[in-house]
Image (cartoon, grey):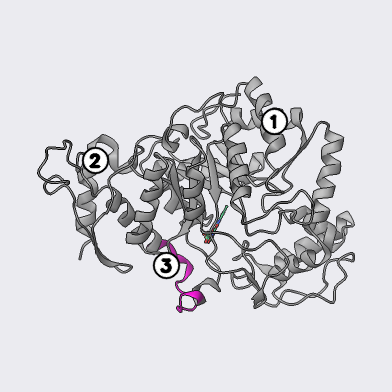
Amino acid sequence: MSTSPRTPGNGQIQFGVFFQGVNHTTVWRDPASGSQTDFESFRRVAQTAERGLFTAFFLGEGLRLREHLGRIHELDVAGRPDAQTALAALAAVTTNIGLVATQNTTYNDPADLAHRLSSLDLLSGGRAAWNIVTTDNAWTGANFRRGGFLAHEDRYIRAEAFVQTAKAIWDSWADGAIAGSRGSRQWLAEDAITPVRRKDASFDVEITGRLPRSGQLHPVLFQAGDSPEGRDFAVRNADVIFSRHAGLEAAKKFREDIVARTLKAGRPADDVKIFPGQEFILAPTAKEAEEKHQWVRERQVGPQTAIAFLEQFWGRPLTEYDPDGPLPDVDPVVDVTDPTRGNAFHGKNARELAAEWRAEAEDKGLSIRQFVSGRAQLNGRGLVGSYDDVADLLAEYAHSGAVDGFNITPWIVPSGLDDIVNELVPRLQDRGVYRTEYEGTTLRQNLGLRAPLSHRNGSLAAVDQTQSEEVA
Ligand SMILES: Cc1cc2nc3c(=O)[nH]c(=O)nc-3n(C[C@H](O)[C@H](O)[C@H](O)COP(=O)(O)O)c2cc1C
């Protein structure tokens, strides 16, 4: 039952909550559905999560409204307040939960972003984290008058330089930089701040860090991006991966891959935690949960949404097809799905994928809408079941070491965590796989992380050395 070096969990499971904002899976037509933008919705979800001893409250980022076949995508939930502004407000009404802001490295700049993240870290008492993304769609670039801006591989080169620069900024104030006594002649100790110089293909900057360290030294680093480059980037830089691999077998495979990469990067096997996104649909009995599942899916995937979902892969309008009929008999317009047409599955062979899906739908006798309902979750079906069955399954996850936790994506806000906190969490505690109190006050402590990489074995000097070597 226990974990192994290749799947190094600690026999426990943690929860984060991903308040999605922009997405296609939030049921917004139901009377119980609240605002996606009012602070009250954020407050209620965050405080419920904290009541359930969740590790983190998580927000995504989109710097432009989503587009579909060249137009603003009007079917799904849109509109999302800036993550750091929302998290700063939440810091004031919570005490333990981590506050994770997704921020991209393609359109932001290190001096500004590092400062805002450490501001959140200080104001929240060491609870901030940065979910590092590179943002892969083609339309966001237009906001910044740079067209698509940066090929996929180049985004990770910039991301790496960006994160190294941010870390150098966070480490640029010496311990004891601020005068210890009121009788001191000056506020800052002499030469306590090391300017950060970076000159490479991505940046040519000289930055003065503007803030001291927080109680957790600097914000925790999450990463979300699944390509081989993205995974290698994660094991070099991140503390936690927000993954798509939630099914037990897929999660085990992903963990083994990440452990191999982590060891190769010279870090301990358990140094990078893994939290897949996951939807939970729960009820007192398995039968009720299955009925609820059908109800949720019908509301998530309306006829137009089903067609729009396929259009992402086919790359052409499919409005002439009946959502209650078979999958389109025409082929996608290009061979490889690319990010200009959709958001999640670029890089796959489109014709092959379409043929596979057609065969599967035909085999199971599924209409477009039924087929898409089963696919609409990026992670598969979601966890659907009775409170007890899902608690048993999560105990299996905990014992397998496949994941360190789940980043829960509620299908409704603000009430979407209520049954998880009231019914599931106590059952997990009874099974000994869920915390009964927060371990510490900082996010780093509650995730069970070691010190930041640059602070291990007194290695701050080594990091400074790396920085100066990179200066041309
Ligand atoms: C679970 C998950 C969540 C993500 N959330 C965001 C987000 O909120 N904003 C964003 O711009 N990109 C987000 N991304 C996209 C990544 O930034 C990245 O651009 C994309 O996955 C392409 O990189 P890859 O080829 O390494 O996967 C997310 C990716 C994953 C896997």
Image location of residue 257, percent across then percent down: 52, 45
Q: Does residue 82 sit above or below 342 in this rendering?
A: above
Q: Residue 459: which disc?
A: 2
Circle 3 SS class: helix
- Quarter of the image for residue 220 reads top left
Q: Quadrant of the N terminus?
A: top right
Does label 2 point to a residue whose CB lies under 8 Å from ligand 1?
Answer: no
Q: What's the residue type where badge 3 is placed?
A: Asp
Magenta stretch: give its range: 143-157
Quadrant position of ligand 1: bottom right
Image location of residue 281, percent across then percent down: 75, 41
Residue at mark 1 = 422
From the viewer's side, name the closer residue of 466 and 86: 86
Q: Determine the residue positioned at 14% across, 44% down.
A: 189
Circle 1/circle 3 CB separation < 8 Å: no
Q: What's the residue type where badge 2 is placed?
A: Ser
Residue at mark 3 = 154
Instruction: Return the disc, 1 or 3, that comes first in the chain's sequence.
Output: 3
Q: Residue 274: which disc?
A: none
